[in-house]
Amino acid sequence: MDTTEIKKQVGFAAVDEFVRSGMKLGLGTGSTAVWAVRRLGELLKAGKLKDILAVATSSQTEMECQKAGIPLRSLNDPEISGALDFAVDGADEVDEDLNLTKGGGGALLIEKIVAYSAKKFVVVVDASKLVKNLGLSFPVPTEVLREARVCAAKAFASLGAQAEVRMAVKKMGAVITDNGNILLDLKFAAAFDPRELETELSRIPGVLGNGIFSRNVSEVLAAHSDGRIERLKK
């Protein structure tokens, strides 16, 4: 089974198992989460689900929802009122304690707000994303105000991280997020405590969000190349 089919399988599985009519949903961003969005659209069009309201975590996901006919709201909408029944998203890495790194697609700030607002948050990945320690192979993304770039980088260095501004492709300069900020990717040479680091990064002035998710992960569905879906719970 190729990588695309693996991601499709696990994205479909999350919707089939956990989504029910009448739910308020958070829909993630990326090459695996997009299959959950597409499956949700299929089930709505077939009449197998109804009365669904969804919150998209990025402009990319918003466009996918519009193509799929999924009704969208914001977390501030009175029909949502800041609380979701279920959220599904991918991850860049998942460690043995089900801590995550996210933000490879640049949507980490809204992804975290949505994930932490959900009663149940399920992560869908291919099994290659399972690691012993976060941040050693894939950098930890952070979303930073442009004015805070240099002082934030110094603060990151004090925590043992080398910070690099994420540069755009087919555009001069840095990647600009949906929220108008820049991304600094943090490279670590040694393992760290994800919960402690998530808290420390959040305390740095000018850092609006970081890609460590150490709370509210209900379950991880990890798809293997042989078609098996491994279920991981804390």
Image: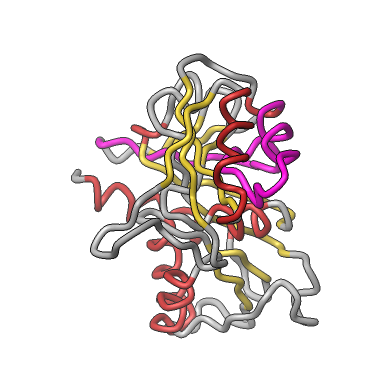
The residue stretch that appears in magenta:
196-225
171 versus 155 height, above or below: below
Question: Residue 55 is drawn in which quadrant?
Answer: bottom right
Horizontal side of 226 relative to 223 (left or right) equals left
Viewer-proximal residue, 115 or 12? 115
To which quarter of the image does residue 187 belong?
top left
Residue 161 against residue 163 in the figure, above or below: above
Q: Compare residues 202 and 54 and report the one nearer the observer.
A: 202
Identity of the residue drawn at 50% across and 20% down: 133
Q: Is residue 22 left or right of residue 68?
A: right
> Going 38% across and 62% down the picture, which residue do you hit?
35
Assign the N terminus to one quadrant of the image.
top left
Is 225 placed above or below 131 here? below
Classify 219 as above or below 159: below
Residue 175 location in percent, x, y? 40, 58
Total tally of numbered discs in the picture? 0
Residue 109 location (% of width, % of height): 60, 55
Q: Is residue 86 magenta?
A: no
Nearer-the-camera pick, 56 or 109: 109
Q: x and y percent of residue 84 in the render?
A: 72, 64
Magenta-drawn stretch contains 204: yes
Measured from the top left, where is residue 76 in percent x and y? Answer: 75, 75
